[in-house]
Amino acid sequence: MQAVPLCPITGFPATRRIQPISGRLIIGLWRGAFGVATEQQLAGIERFGLWESPCGLVFFEPMLPGDDAFYQELHRRWDFERVLAPPGLARPEFKRIAEIVRPEEKVLDVGCAEGGLSLYLPHASYVGLDPNFSATAAGPDIRHEAIAAHAASHSGEYDVVCALHVIEHVADPLGFAGELLNCLRTGGRLFITVPGRHSPITDIPNFVLNAPPNHLSWWNEGALGALADRLDLAVEAVEKLPFWPCDSIIYWMGRLSPKLTGDRYFRAHWTWYVALAWSWLAARVCDRLFQVPATAQSSGLLLIARKPS
């Protein structure tokens, strides 16, 4: 009998195990779908558990994050950094944050990729952190530095701290968010975005991007609220984010895939492999022919919270 793990946010025991998942299945899906070898990193993990906590967070046990070799190989093969966050791309969270940030405020963007957010903040002072960033001759101030090291030397320095689609990749989300908070001055704002747990991303069967060592946790409004509560943050809003162009393929995959997920999300069965392949091929066609409907279910969530006095 597998021991019940503790929620990585609240520390309370998980309420249920959604499903066990074979480590061999996860390794095979990474190899088959993306051509990325995870045998070495996932070696020795016979089975993952997918658990739900009382606050609504869904998380994998063990929470094994991708190492540098994993992300370098994934980005080399699929160039996710430039696909997901190229400078100038109008991501909805970029626009929303730009509406709130005031002139001359100091902004820290953790996990910033190419620093696309900086283009929306010409009125602010911008610093980005990303260990996988490929430096260019000119551009925003992006540093190869971990958040823990930066927080140690820049405590309380920033008016705004952002972590956009980052926290779902880390094994200690509460500790990570605490480091973000350490960089924030009293009264400053914290912005965190995550893929929504109840969104098309979980409608896709065997969608391994939503599994270790990439996504380690799935978030909803309750989980974000619990995170803010643990950090004594004043929540200003938890907003739903619409789909943006690079998310559209996810929308169509979720819309067109056979409805197999719900009680489970990963399964070593030929019908699930065929469903995944079908959703990918059909989504590519629809993505070229149609726009995502304005009525589409949101793709992500944005937490806006303030560090109180």
Image (spheres, rainbow, N blue to C red):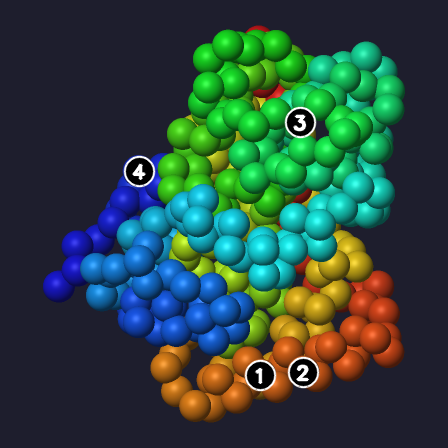
Residue at image position (62%, 37%) is: 133
The residue where tag 4 is placed is 11
Does the residue at mark 3 contact the one at mark 2 (Cβ under 8 Å)? Answer: no
The residue where tag 3 is placed is 142
Q: Quadrant of residue 256?
A: bottom right
Does the residue at mark 1 contact the one at mark 4 (Cβ under 8 Å)? Answer: no
Q: Quadrant of residue 17?
A: bottom left
Question: Is residue 53 visible from the viewing direction of this image?
Answer: no
Q: Identify the amino acid type marked 1.
A: Ala
Q: Looking at the image, is mark 1 or mark 3 earlier in the sequence?
A: 3
The spot of residue 301 in percent (x, y) is: 64, 47
Q: Is residue 254 above or below residue 248?
A: below
Q: CA distance from mark 3 to mark 2?
A: 36 Å
Q: Nearer the viewer, residue 11 or 150?
A: 150
Local secondary structure at mark 2: helix
Q: Quadrant of the N terminus?
A: bottom left
Q: Quadrant of the C terminus?
A: top right
The spot of residue 206 in percent (x, y) is: 47, 74
Q: Is residue 211 above or below residue 179?
A: below
Q: CA distance from mark 2 to mark 4?
A: 41 Å
Q: Looking at the image, is mark 2 or mark 4 earlier in the sequence?
A: 4
Q: Identify the amino acid type marked 4.
A: Gly
Specify few, some or many for label 1: CA neighbours under 10 Å numbering under 14, 14-19, or 20 or more: some
Does the residue at mark 1 contact the one at mark 2 (Cβ under 8 Å)? Answer: yes
Q: Identify the amino acid type marked 2.
A: Leu
Pair 3/4: label in front: 3
The residue where tag 1 is placed is 277
Question: Is residue 306 visible from the viewing direction of this image?
Answer: yes
Q: Is residue 71 above or below residue 226?
A: below
Q: Quadrant of residue 159?
A: top right
Residue at image position (41%, 46%) is: 67
